[in-house]
Amino acid sequence: MIIVSPSVLSANFLDLRADIEKLNKSKAQWLHYDVMDGNFVPNMSFGPQILKQINQITDKFIDVHIMVSNPKAFVDYFAGCKVDLLTFHIEATKDIEEASELIDYIHSKSIKASVSVKPKTDVKVLEPLLHKLDMVLVMSVEPGFGGQKFNPEVLEKCDWLYQYKCQHNLNYHIQIDGGINGETGKQAVMHHCDSLVAGSFCFNNPNGFDSGVETLLALENA
């Protein structure tokens, strides 16, 4: 099953309630919430207060992606919010042991744990962690920079993650984020991604929010 996770980073924050209501009424299963600290990535975005307000008006699965230099602290910041899944960057940890401990810490908060890799990071570095992960997020653009084109070279990582999952009987989702639309989403699904993050393709779709969501959901049968 394909999971569509529209990114509220592309929503209209002058009328956020209306955009969240569009998401609520759609067939999108998740809501993607990007957190940037201005350090790990050059831009800054949302904190827990906005998410708490969003929690009040949606029952969607909350998919939080923290692009931050001190991920453990941010786990604590968001512990008081409804967070179903939290993704941190492997590049923000000093070694695999620290990453493993952070996964355990996230799970101790009754939150599903996910790790992300940047386009230039070798996904095989995650091999010691995959048995305890609920998802892996493959970035198809550099995090924190808008307007980038989808990088098809990262699809090899998705293939490797799928093969490893099958070989070891694991159950993690493979998510992709960055430049996802009908065409690039199809490529991602062909390479075994089952969770698609889409911002502009949903919230700024000229044919409407539902059109973007339904186009991506239909890729399961493409």
Image: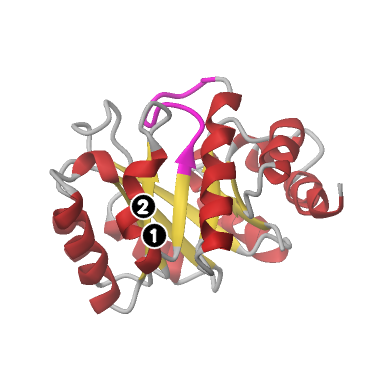
Residue 83 location (% of width, % of height): 38, 68
Determine the residue positioned at 80% across, 46% down.
215
Magenta extent: 138-148
Q: Which mark is residue 130?
A: 1
Determine the residue positioned at 53% across, 44% down.
160
Left or right: 117, with 39 as reference point: right
- On-image quarter of the N terminus: bottom right
Disc 1 residue crowd, few under 14, some 14–19, many 20+, Cα 10 Å = many
Colour scheme employed for the rendering of this structure:
secondary structure
Tell me the kind of residue under disc 1.
Answer: Leu
Residue 52 location (% of width, % of height): 35, 66
Q: Which mark is residue 90?
A: none
Q: Is residue 15 visible?
A: no
Q: Marks 1 and 2: in contact by CB < 8 Å?
A: yes
From the viewer's perspective, is residue 82 above or below residue 141?
Answer: below
Q: Is residue 196 visible?
A: yes
